[in-house]
Amino acid sequence: MLRNSRKFGRVAGILGFITLAVITETIFAAGIKKWINDEGQVHFGDQPPASVSATAVKVPRTPKPDDRAASIDDPNGIEGQLRRMQAAKATNSRNRRNPINTG
């Protein structure tokens, strides 16, 4: 009995996740609209007022890195951050072993 309830829980969790993903994608698929109000201010939203004409704005998705080499060479990438953290840790460790007397 316990085994069936675990399996049911797992299936229910997976179905819940898929449902949430589909609903979220549907909401964001409605798109962003751009319009200009009477005072000349630009507005963005998903429901523009009926009194203005709005244009659809294409929102780009986050690009995925094509190859690993590009992210390794990027100093702001995760590998660059890791190298900086490791260098700082090594420097701190050396400074603790060989303190400079300032007195």
Image (cartoon, helix red, strand yellow):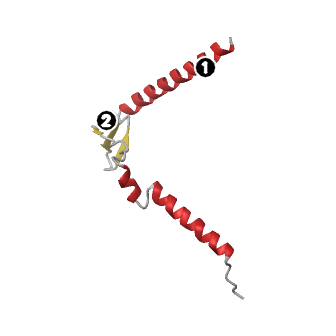
Graded by Cα atoms within 10 Å as few (under 14), some (14 to 19) or many (20 or more), the crowding at tag 1 reads few
- Name the residue type under label 1: Gly
Q: Please say if 11 is above or below 56.
A: above
Q: Which residue is mark 2?
A: 51
Q: Please say if 51 is above or below 43.
A: above
x, y (%) of residue 74? 39, 59
Q: Residue at x 33, y 46 (%)?
A: 66
x, y (%) of residue 46? 38, 36
Q: Is residue 62 left or right of residue 13?
A: left
x, y (%) of residue 40? 31, 50
Mark 1 / mark 2, whichever is N-terminal: 1
Q: Residue at x 62, y 70 (%)?
A: 92
Residue in the foreground of this view, choosing between 32 and 69: 69
Label 1 residue SS: helix
x, y (%) of residue 18? 47, 24
Residue in the foreground of this view, choosing between 33 and 68: 68
Query: Disc 1 vs disc 2: which is toward the camera?
Result: 1
Graded by Cα atoms within 10 Å as few (under 14), some (14 to 19) or many (20 or more), the crowding at tag 2 reads few
Label 2 residue SS: loop
Q: Is residue 14 left or right of residue 45?
A: right
Label 1 – label 2 distance at C-alpha: 49 Å
Q: Which residue is mark 1?
A: 9
